[in-house]
Amino acid sequence: MHYVTEDELREAYSKEPFGTYEVPKGARLTPSARQFLIDFRVAFDGDEQTPAPGAHGQVAKGMASAKQPLDLGALVHDANLLGARLRLLARRSLGIDNAVARQAEAVGRRWQGATTPADLVADKPKAEGVSDPPGPPPQPAFDAGVHPVFFEMAYVHAQLGRYARAWAKAQAGARPEDARTIGAWVTEAARVCEVLEAAVERAGEEV
């Protein structure tokens, strides 16, 4: 099954803005892709998981049923993409901030290689409470003494935060076991963001 991602929608929208979107047959939207359509007031239908929003982001009546269980395959897909992004950051951070490089590589490798939701979390999820996603990304000082990789860290932080917030919203309507898995993943994403925030802050102090 193909999962339509936020990045796919953003790329298409940047080429030519659209007001309606039809999900390809046999495909599903990832939560972040669905949130993108809602945020940009794009009406959509054809998604088997969620009712379509109207022209103003309102959920239309009589559309697809929202009672179907959340498909965590989309979470795996999102994590695969973010894992690849973290590993690229890890490679670029080597020799500049090795603590970030090690953390990004460890988490990124696990996420990139995940094939099931269970592969995404290092520890067994314990509770299904809604997890707190990362806050706003850090802002590196615009100074020649600050290496460009710290700006990349801020960018990756923003990406992680966007996906984590979308999944935190989806967690509230998930089955208990799925909610625990989502919560554990969102928590880990938030921890990675904390590492990135600390690194950017250190870089600013050293200028």
Image (cartoon, rainbow, N blue to C red):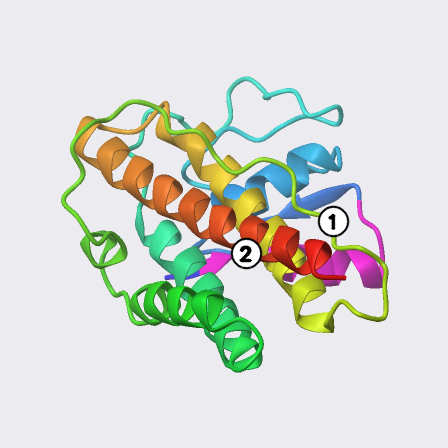
Q: Residue at x 27, y 32 (%)?
A: 179
Vertical position of residue 95 compared to residue 189: above or below: below
**Are there few (<14), some (14-19), or many (20+) residues within 10 Å of tag 1?**
some
Quadrant in the picture for residue 43: top right
- The vertical placement of 7 against 109, above or below, is above
What residue would you read off at disc 1? Answer: 139
- Residue 5: numbered disc: 2
- Label total for image: 2
Q: Helix or strand or loop: what does disc 1 sit on?
A: loop
**Residue 17 lies in the magenta stretch:** yes
- At 21% from the left and 59% from the top, the residue drawn is 119
The answer to which of 121 and 142 lies nearer the viewer is: 142
Q: Is residue 97 visible?
A: yes
Residue 118 pos. (x, y %): 19, 53
| 20 up-or-down from 102: above or below | above
Q: Does residue 85 appear left or right of residue 174 in this picture?
A: right
Of 181 and 60, nearer the camera is 181
Q: Residue 74 — which label?
A: none
Name the spot of residue 16 as percent of width and height, x first: 85, 58
The secondary structure type at the circle numbered 2 is loop
x 80%, y 55%: residue:
141
Q: Quadrant of the C terminus?
A: bottom right
Q: Position of residue 12 (x, y in %)?
A: 74, 61
Residue 147 appears at what percent x and percent y?
72, 72
Number of residues whose C-alpha sits closer than 10 Å to that of mark 2, classed few (under 14), some (14–19) or many (20 or more): many
Tell me where the magenta segment starts and ends, as one range: 3-18
What kind of secondary structure does the magenta stretch mostly adopt?
Answer: helix
119 displayed left or right of 12: left
